[in-house]
Image: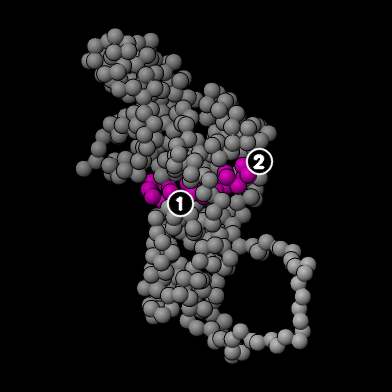
Amino acid sequence: MRDARDAEDERLLAEGETDRLLAGWVETIQDICVAKMRGPVGEDVAQAVCERLWRELKAGRHRDGRYPFRVIVHSVTRWVCKGWYEPGWQESELFDLDGAAPDESEAVVVEVTLEQFVATLPSGDGEVAALTLLEGLEPGEIATRLDKKPNAVYQAIHRNAKKLREWLEE
Amino acid sequence: MTADVQALLDELVRRYARGEPLDVEAALARAGDRADELAPLIEAFLARAPRRAPSPDALAYVRSLDEPPMLRARVGKALKVDDVVDAIVAECKLDAEARPKVRRYYQQLEGGILDPSRVAASVWDAITGLLGRSRALLSAPPGPAPAAAPMYRIDAQLSLSERLVPRSAAEPQVPDEVDALFLGDPSA
């Protein structure tokens, strides 16, 4: 259940750089919460998630490395989003953020990565996908880098986008 | 008019790869009645995406998590204490001369040294409306003030022959409307 994304988190946790560790997840937490809650209330939810994770990190939890921090982030995010509208949940949990942790055995095990998606593609499209999705290059830059015609790159990007959506829907 | 879900997803994916903010809220709004189709795709993508390097803003946000939540929310909105005081005075229909007292109480509330459960709903309405956060999120966890051992100067000398003068008239202050708003109504 560990992958390349966890190495940096493990280093930051081992070196006690918990602020940088959580900071690397703040924007992802906010984006997921807004998507899950379908609107600006997601900002409130994200704040509760970050506060909980921050208190847990300061209390020394998760240092044993039993679960990758990525899994804990997704687990807590899912748990807070799920309980947000339950009566009384906000009051009790927000005043006792150091209380019981979510059931980590139910943690979302996020084993699939974009790298794996890229690896499923034919080599030509895979090259384009790697540069688009993982390196953030623009089509013109990709065409230059791979010595391809811009039109060929655009077609590959179009094919990859459709396959990415199918893969995300699996 | 709703934008195409595929196009919105592609745009988000490209923004993520370039390290730009996603603005999920705007994307969902543009998806219109297909937001329920787009949202799970965004979630699935973010669960699988590479880890991002922490931005300076995110790092500052995390470091601010130790501050009382109300202070953090106010600073986040670039508001002054007086802005919140104005909102409370207006919402609770208080006279202008009540401002200094409201200000004192608000600062105690913001600093986490005033029990938030005793504060009137009308005050909370003003604060939550202005700061855009729920009451639960803005309330600092209640708890006793940190205990401090008494300190004495070794060379202190107190001459009991000195005449003690009361600092103010001995008349007890009658709780007013502002006290009731922040400390609860003793008659309730």
For label 1, the SS is helix
Q: Quick one: quadrant of the C terminus of chain A?
A: top left
Q: Which residues are magenta?
A: A36-58
Q: Is residue A162 above or below residue A30?
A: above
User: Is residue A115 rendered to the left or right of residue A17?
Assistant: left
Q: Residues within 10 Å of mark 1 (few under 14, many from 20)?
A: some
Kindly indicate whether the residues beneath marks 2 and 1 are on one polypeptide chain. Answer: yes
Helix, strand or loop for the magenta stretch, by majority: helix
Residue B112 sits in quarter:
bottom right
Q: Is residue B133 above or below residue B52?
A: below
Residue B127 sits in quarter:
bottom left
Chain at numbered mark 2: A
Q: Residues within 10 Å of mark 2 (few under 14, many from 20)?
A: some
Q: Is residue B118 visible?
A: yes
User: Is residue A43 rendered to the left or right of residue A125?
Assistant: right
Expressed as whole percent of the image width and height from the top left, the position of residue B66 reads 56, 51
**3D distance between C-alphas at marks 2 and 1:** 23 Å
Identify residue type, mark 1: Asp
**Residue drawn where x is 44% and y is 23% of the image:** A114
Expressed as whole percent of the image width and height from the top left, the position of residue B55 reads 45, 37
Mark carried by residue A44: 1
Question: Mark 2 — residue?
Answer: A61
Instruction: State yes or no: residue A51 in magenta.
Output: yes
Expressed as whole percent of the image width and height from the top left, the position of residue A28 reads 45, 37
Instruction: State yes or no: residue A53 in magenta.
Output: yes
Out of A48 and B28, give the one closest to the viewer.
A48
